[in-house]
Amino acid sequence: MSVHYKTAAKVFLQRLTLALGMAAVIPVHSANLPDAQELMQLLGIGQNALAELEQGKTVSFDVAEGKENELAAGVVMYLPASPSKIIQLINKKGLASVDSDLLAQGAIPISAAVDNFKGFGFKAESGEAKDFLQAEPGSEFNLSFQEFESLRNADSTQPDAASQSYRKMLFDRWQSYRKNGLKGIASYDRGNGTEADPGGELKAATQDSKVLARYFPELYKAWLDYPAALPKGADEQFFWLNRKVEGRPTAILGHRIIFDAAAAGTLILARQFYVGHSYNSNQLNIGCLPYRAGSLVFYANRNFTDQVAGLGSSLKHSIGREQMKGEIIKRLTNLRKAIK
């Protein structure tokens, strides 16, 4: 293994570890890849955890939460595949391909029109479609004041009225984000003069990655100030999802950046800048680092939901965090199956 490769991989691990919010002291004078002891120190876990990772088990790590309505968790898994093979699968099928609750998905091209969102729709006579057309400000649907108002003008006698109205809203929200980034994300009207602010949540989640700003300044700036230009080695993708959440179909709009650090590994930044109901927004970092004959995959997730705020917040966070870890583990397990 060349000194250049070792140095690159060492630096990438330093940057990735700090970017994901893991507290660690790394001896920067060393040009070698960390041994097992150093790696366990980086993750803040016990001596036996590395053996567990090599057996295909998962290890959790803490991710600091910055808001009362935020849930955050991190999980590491060893996969018997190179970072390039893992990223090739993600590029081809998307991260949603390892999500067992996914109903449908699609790419959003830069030249998108309303028809690009036709994969999302309500069943014409379903209760969900009727509820949507009659929706009022509150927590049942994540819509802005203007979007709720537009539903009053929808022709409910048309069999596909709910789906057509929603697709137009999705298209408009994607356009606004494409043009104005986080500032272009409309708030959700909760009624009684209250709102949820997904754009502010995602901005805070990005700003919390202060070391990411230090070690990947161009990528950090592009992510925070989107539509700022992306640095060399970074590619972006937009996508829509129709995912079952709490037993209901849920429209989701996402933006993903894949940053290739050559032989040292790959970093993925992804955010859900619109979610139809149940939670407000989501942001995650995924790092794939070469290790032995495969890769260590770091998955750090931040989810914003009003359901964990207020009375009993501490207990709600504890329960929600464990549920989130379980969901991450399920997705990483599905990813391992997919690459075999």
Image: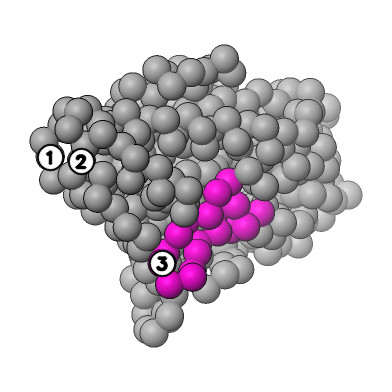
Q: Considering the numbered disc 1 on the image, is that residue within a helix, a strand or a loop?
A: loop
Q: Please give left or right for residue 339 compared with residue 235 in the image.
A: left
The residues bearing labels 3 and 2 have C-alpha atoms spaced at a distance of 21 Å
Quadrant where the image shows the N terminus: top right
- Residue carrying label 1: 126
The residues bearing labels 2 and 1 have C-alpha atoms spaced at a distance of 5 Å
- Residue carrying label 3: 191
Q: Using the image, determine if residue 141 lies above or below residue 123.
A: below
Numbered mark located on residue 173 in the image: none
Query: What is the x, y in percent for residue 307?
Result: 37, 68
11 in the magenta segment: no
Give the residue drawn at x 44%, y 34%. Answer: 170
For the residue carrying disc 2, how many other residues have a C-alpha within 10 Å: few (<14), some (14-19), or many (20+)? many
**Displayed quadrant of residue 56:** top left
Q: Using the image, determine if residue 20 lies above or below residue 154.
A: below
Query: What is the x, y in percent for residue 31?
Result: 83, 40
Q: Considering the numbered disc 3 on the image, is that residue within a helix, a strand or a loop?
A: strand
Query: What is the x, y in percent for residue 309?
Result: 44, 75
Give whichever of discs 3 and 2 has the lower sequence position: 2
Q: Amino acid at mark 1?
A: Ser
Numbered mark located on residue 129 in the image: 2
**Displayed quadrant of residue 223:** top right
Q: Using the image, determine if residue 286 lies above or below residue 188.
A: above
Q: Amino acid at mark 2?
A: Ala
Which span of residues is magenta-colored?
185-203
Q: Please give left or right for residue 330 compared with residue 221 in the image.
A: left
